[in-house]
Image (cartoon, rainbow, N blue to C red):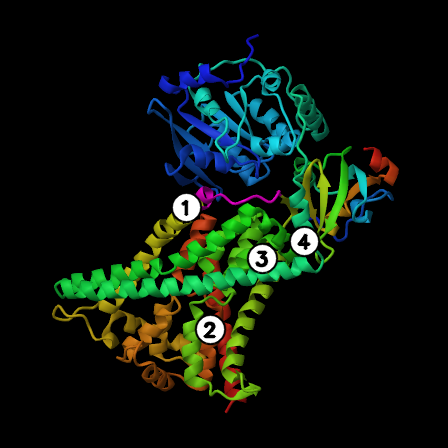
Amino acid sequence: MVFNFMKARPASPGHNLSDLAVGESGILEDFDMPQSIAEHLMNLGFVPGLEVLVARSGPGGNPRVYRVDGTEVALRRDLSRCIAVRPLGDAEAEMR
Amino acid sequence: MSVPVSIQGPVAANRADHASPVYKTVAVVGPPNAGKTTLFNRLTGLRQRVGNFPGVTVEHHIGSYRLASGEEVSLIDLPGVYSLNPKSEDEKVTIDVLNGVMPGADRPDAIILVLDSNNLNRHLVLAGRVIALGLPTLVLLNMADELHKQGGQVDVLPLARQLGTPVALVSAATGEGLHAVANFLVATPQTPEPLELPIFGDPRHCREWAVRMGSHAAYRRGATPEWTRRLDSIFLHKLWGGVIFAVVIVGVFQTIFSLGQPASDLLQRFLDNVAVRLTGVLPAGIISSLIVNGVWKGAGSVLVFLPQILLLFLVIGILEDSGYLARAAVISDKVMAKVGLNGKSFIPLLSAYGCAVPAIMATRTIENKRDRIATILIAPFMTCSARLPVYTMVIAAFIPNRPVLGPVVGTRAVAMLSLYVLGFAMAVATARALKSSVLRSRDVAFIMELPPYRWPMWKSLGLRLMDRGNAFLFRAGTVILGVSILLWALTYLPMHNGQPPPIADSAIAHIGHFIEPAIRPLGFNWKIGVGLLSSFAAREVIIATMGTLHGVDPESHAMALQQALRGDLSPAGAIALLVFFAFAMQCMSTMAVVRRETNSWKWPVLQFLYMTAVAYVAAFVAYRLTLLYWN
């Protein structure tokens, strides 16, 4: 299967990882991408149900660095757009 | 059910002093960045070599670990894997070796699994998969020093009980706790059942299982080192990140040019001196000529690359082990994305401006095979240092120096710069063409793990340098030596009355005449043809060849050679020659290294044909255009 991230959009109208600003966090929900990439992300700690934080943005604003499960991983915008998240409110993030 | 004992403590340590190993071959497995290679280096030191399984490009190391009894156990260091999923080549190799179905490899009797104790929630998932294979396994929770420093903790005994394997908390960097390895290797195998293994296939369940295992062991992860975050806020800063990146890149180049080039020159002078001595000592004749001009000069043409290769790998090794290379990839990713590659290709392509040979070896940091091949294929278009002497000679001979931009920038500087731009532009065009056709990446994305910053360890760096140096000298070197002996033979034959022929009658001159019709459209005569043929050994060899053909010494009579060149080439032919050199793959060292790194002749042959074709067409166009517009 040939996959083009640029054309892909998450099927659900909900939030995705690229919607979050630096310093915001969310709960990982779903991946809209080929299985092999999703598996690689999960190996790196992007497991649905875990909290992910947008740690910083690179010099050009792309890729951005995400903190998940104690590690930091850089992803391009086109990929982070395919990761559905439930944004955490500030209070909720504080609690966790 | 027997309860496995965590093998630590003085009693167990004494046992290892005398006992014989119960395992002969042990595989070392672990995720990337868990310190697997550091552990392997500590256990085997210099008693290791590189291995290639037939048909795969993935490399592994084989080493021997000596027990206190003097007996040795063979250790196989397999590629770093996150899981055992046969879709990735690295992971398929690991699975095949562990299952004993990899041709050319013995099935291991046991496994040493190295995990990062700071990342157990992720890494224990791999433990579940590896233990499920059923081989006796020792689980090492590595980087204990960092775990403790950051306030984390883990109890190995309950974890060992849960997993059904011995577990030890170690630090491969400091050597702490490593007697567990010796104890494991001499222990009578116990075959307890793990209490519970994860349900494979569902990552969420695997992960829940890993967290449960961790909680049995009272696992608490250490805090991320604060200084890693502080450094990242500088190194990945919107403004300073780019500035520091530029400084680092310039520094890398400065190091290679200011230290590597003089070292290469010094080595070259030494080799030439030895060649002169050898000629004096050996009785004149075919044997002397073979030894001096064939073998010694051939070996020399390999050796002179070594200082630059070692320096480049030292610098890249420091960047890689410190963690900066991952950040550099993030910073350069945006630019590289424009040509269809990603940030991981940046450093190799940059090093290709020095020399394509170490650059191609440096592509090992690119995990995606297609991106790696694309990077290997375009790297020789970058203007390497071997093109410089050729450019300098031809430009000096044909292009009059007139000021273009003030007194500093003249026509010659512009010509030189255009050749750099030309090579770069062709690299970009080729990358785009490759990435949108045969090497289009499917199902891959730029995903870069950013490890914490660490101090590089000299021992690891040293072993890696030796490894790369050996790989270049012995694997690539044999091919290069063979071709130089062939070239020597072509200049030495056919013999007349036991004497070598004048160069105009030699076999290589006949070949030169033979190819002349093919190169005449480019404005080259047979002498330039012979120079081109010899330059396929290495680009700068054309200078020595033209010198020999004209009977002048290129070192001391540079002016004479430049004048002689004007007899061989019209100005249009000279432009064509420069363009040809900008594009052609005239470097057998590069071809030998591409062959070695891709583990097949397919890519170097395709690359050679493609680059030569591009060079030929471009030189033809340049020749005709110059004839039209420059009189």
The answer for how far apart the CA atoms under marks 4 and 2 are is 44 Å
Which of discs 1 and 4 lies nearer the camera? The answer is 4
In this rendered view, identify the residue nearer to me: B360 or B240. B240
Instruction: Mark 4 vs mark 2: tell me if same chain.
Output: yes
* Amino acid marked by disc 1: Asp
- Residue at the spot of label 4: B234
Residue B220: horizontal and vertical position, in percent?
A: 68, 27
Residue B544: horizontal and vertical position, in percent?
A: 32, 73
As helix, strand or loop, the secondary structure at mark 1 comes to helix
- Residue at the spot of label 2: B580
- Residue at the spot of label 1: B467
Please, which residue is most extreme toward the bottom here? B631
Q: Which one is earlier in the sequence, the residue at label 1 or at label 2? A: 1
As helix, strand or loop, the secondary structure at mark 3 comes to helix
Q: Which one is earlier in the sequence, the residue at label 4 or at label 2? A: 4
The quarter of the rendered structure image containing the N terminus of chain B is: top right
Which residue: 35% across, 58% down? B302
Q: Is residue A94 left or right of residue B39?
A: right
Q: Which one is earlier in the sequence, the residue at label 1 or at label 4? A: 4
Residue B395 in sight from this viewpoint: yes
Q: In the figure, residue B424 lies in which quadrant? A: bottom right
